[in-house]
Amino acid sequence: MNNPFKYSRDNKRYHTLAYHNKSLGIKSHKASIDAGLSCPNIDGTVSKGGCIFCDGSGGYFTDKTLSIKEQLDKEIERIRKKVSDAKITAYFQSNTNTYCSLTKLQSMIDVCLEDERVSFISLGTRPDCIDDEKLKLLKKASELKPITLELGLQTSNDNTALIINRGYKYETFKNAALKIKEQGIRLCVHLITGLPGETADDMVNTARDVALIKPDAVKIHLMHVIKGTALHKMYEDGLYTPLSFYEYIDAAVRMLEVLPAETVIERITGDGDKNKLIAPLWSRDKIRVLGSIDKLMAERNTYQSRLYLQDSEKECIIE
Ligand code: SF4
C-alpha cells in the first residue's frame, strides 16, 4: 500500500525525528546535563512531592557533582565512542532548567555557546518558570546556536492536572507556549498517555489542543509506573491501572491523526529507566510497540495530520 504521508521515506506514517534529522543533514546526539536545579513543584514553592509519576532523577548518565563543562566532556566522550562524527545537543534534562536566576541561566547557556563541540541546546522546563526576561535571554542565545524549550504539559485537562499534581493550569502552558513560538524559539511539548482517569478521548483532546499551537515537536510518552513514586503507591493500592498494549497503540495513532504534519514526533514510546520500571512491562519491547503503531496506521489507512485540518482554522491567542 502506498504511504500517503508526505514527510516519510519509508513505511512511517508520522514525522519521525530520523526523517527530520536526515532532511536537515543532522546527526545529533543528546548529552544529558544536570545543572543542579530544583523544581517549584518539589521544593514547596508550588507544591511538595512533585508530579505523581516523577522520581526527580532526570537523565541516566548525569552526575551533578561535576560542573556543566565536565559533564559535557564525559557525555561527548561516551557519545563519540559510538558515533565519532555525532553533532551534540546539550540537553538540560533533570528537573526544571529555567527555575533559576537570569545570571545562572546565562552561565548555563554560555558554557554551551563557548563549547565548539555543542551544536544545539535543549532545556526541559515548566511553563510557569518562563518569563519575558528569560525568553529574551534565550532568544539572543538562539541566534548563535538553536535552542529548544521542552515543556512537560502531559495533558490539557485541568482535572487530570490536579490528580497528577502538576501545579499549573492549561492556560499557563498555552500562554507560555505561544510566547516561546512568538520569539522563534523551537518548542517541544511532552504529552503522556494513560494518566489516571483519562480515556483515549481525553488523550486525543490534549493532542488537538496542542495542535492549535503548532509546536515544532512533540514527545508522546506512555505513563510508566516508576519505583518509589506516588503513582507506584496508587498502583499497589489498586487505584491506578496502566494502559494495555492495544489501548496505547490505539491512543497513540489517534493522537497522531490530529497533530500537524510538520510537527516532529521526537518520541512515541516510553523511555524510562528499565531498572525502576514497575509497569507496564510490555513497554520494554520498543520494537514491538513501534512496529504495531506502523501496522495499525496502515490497517486504518491513516497518517499524522489526517484529522488535523478541520481544527486548524481555530484561533489560538495569548490570554
Ligand atoms: S515538573 Fe517535572 S521535575 Fe517537577 S515534579 Fe513535575 S515531572 Fe518532576
Image (cartoon, rainbow, N blue to C red):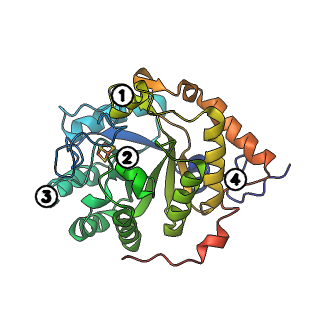
The residue carrying mark 2 is 163
Q: CA distance from mark 4 to mark 3?
A: 42 Å
Task: Tell me the residue at 14%/57% (across/down).
Answer: 101
Please identify the residue farthest to the front as the structure is shown: 238
Per the image, label 4 sits on a secondary structure element best described as loop
Q: Are marks 4 and 3 in contact (CB under 8 Å)?
A: no
Q: CA distance from mark 1 to mark 4?
A: 42 Å
Q: Are marks 1 and 3 in contact (CB under 8 Å)?
A: no
Which numbered dot is residue 233?
1
Q: Nearer the viewer, residue 163 or 82?
A: 163
Per the image, label 1 sits on a secondary structure element best described as helix
Q: CA distance from mark 1 to mark 2?
A: 14 Å
Task: Tell me the residue at 55%/59% (across/down).
Answer: 205
Ligand 1 shows up in the quarter that is top left
Per the image, label 2 sits on a secondary structure element best described as helix
Which numbered dot is residue 8?
4
Mark 2 crowd level (few <14, some 14–19, many ≥20, 10 Å Cα): some
Hey, which quadrant is residue 233 in on the image? top left
Q: Amino acid at mark 4?
A: Ser
Mark 4 crowd level (few <14, some 14–19, many ≥20, 10 Å Cα): some
